[in-house]
Image (cartoon, rainbow, N blue to C red):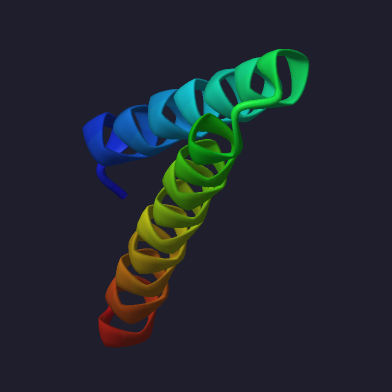
């Protein structure tokens, strides 16, 4: 498990949520969609880290 990668993914998720919320407040659809995209990227990063952890456990 790479703690650094997980922290980066969590920060990306927080950034995305904030940007999406800003888009909601200001009515800016671009901010809203970019925020959702950042959250999706963070989710993928977490899935990759989980897969790495699972592989390490399986190998020994």
Q: Position of residue 43 (x, y in %)?
A: 50, 55
Q: Position of residue 20 (x, y in %)?
A: 62, 30
Residue at image point 38% right, 38% down: 9
Q: Is residue 19 above or below residue 50?
A: above
In this view, the residue farthest toward the right is: 25
Q: Position of residue 17 (x, y in %)?
A: 61, 28
Q: Is residue 54 above or below residue 53?
A: below
Residue at image point 31% right, 30% down: 8
* Left or right of residue 21: residue 32: left
Compare residues 2 and 19 and report the one nearer the observer.
19
Residue at image point 28% right, 72% down: 56
Residue at image point 43% right, 43% down: 38
Instruction: Give the quadrant of residue 57.
Output: bottom left
Q: Is residue 14 above or below residue 44?
A: above
In this view, the residue farthest toward the bottom is: 58
Compare residues 7 and 35 and report the one nearer the observer.
35
Compare residues 22 and 39 and report the one nearer the observer.
22
Q: Is residue 14 above or below residue 9?
A: above
Compare residues 36 and 54 and report the one nearer the observer.
36
Instruction: Give the quadrant of residue 60.
Output: bottom left
Q: How many marks?
A: 0
Instruction: Give the quadrant of residue 12.
Output: top left
């Amino acid at each position: 498990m790479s703690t650094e990668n997980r922290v980066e993914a969590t920060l990306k998720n927080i950034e995305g949520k904030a940007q999406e919320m800003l888009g909601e407040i200001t009515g800016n659809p671009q901010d809203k969609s970019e925020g959702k995209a950042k959250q999706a990227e963070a989710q993928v990063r977490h899935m990759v880290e989980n897969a790495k952890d699972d592989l390490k456990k399986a190998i020994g």
